[in-house]
């Protein structure tokens, strides 16, 4: 079955919501190197509350992207790991993360220009579009 992300009733949009969530993206990137305990995940990701991380992990587990393994120890130890389906997201998410790292300066500069009411950098030096003449 192949979904249509432009169909508002297609479940593909639910998947795009999941993988477009910043916390899910950071979880995939963190777990790409192997299983992690909750506290190590939280510390590596940074800035996420335990409640939000727990909600994200539960949703990703429900969607088949990761597993949660509880070890019968005292105190209990829980590890999270990507499933094969979760690993299949690694390349696309790494590509987006790399793009973000390479372009963060340009995006911040564009935001600053927009806040100052300046024209976008490309528009300042580009010739007028023929249809606009």
Image: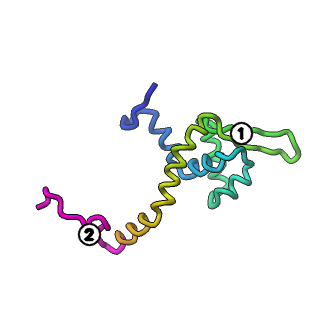
Q: Position of residue 4 (x, y in %)?
A: 39, 33
**Is residue 50 in the magenta section?**
no
**Secondary structure category for the residue under label 1:** strand
Residue annotated with mark 2: 124
Residue 16, placed above or below residue 44: above
Q: Residue at x 62, y 49 (%)?
A: 27
Q: Residue at x 81, y 45 (%)?
A: 77
Q: For the residue carrying disc 1, how many other residues have a C-alpha within 10 Å: few (<14), some (14-19), or many (20+)?
A: some
Q: Are the residues at dot 2 and dot 1 in contact (C-beta closer than 8 Å)? A: no
**Secondary structure category for the residue under label 2:** helix
Q: Nearer the viewer, residue 119 or 59?
A: 119
Side of 80 where 14 appears, left or right: left
Q: Residue furthest left?
A: 133
Q: Residue at x 52, y 53 (%)?
A: 97
Residue annotated with mark 1: 68
Range of residues picked out in magenta = 115-133
What colour scheme has been applied to the protein in the rendered image? rainbow
């Amino acid at each position: 079955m192949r979904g249509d992300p432009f169909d508002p009733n297609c479940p593909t949009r639910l998947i795009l919501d999941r993988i477009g969530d910043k916390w899910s993206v950071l979880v995939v990137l963190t777990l790409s190197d192997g299983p992690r305990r909750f506290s190590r995940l939280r510390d590596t990701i940074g800035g996420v509350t335990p409640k939000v991380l727990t909600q994200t992990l539960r949703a990703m587990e429900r969607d088949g992207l990761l597993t949660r393994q509880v070890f019968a120890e005292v105190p209990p130890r829980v590890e999270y790991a990507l499933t094969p389906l979760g690993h299949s997201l690694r390349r696309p998410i790494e590509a987006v993360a790399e793009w973000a790292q390479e372009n963060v300066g340009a995006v911040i500069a564009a935001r600053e220009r927009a806040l100052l009411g300046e024209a976008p950098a490309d528009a300042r030096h580009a010739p007028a579009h023929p249809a606009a003449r």
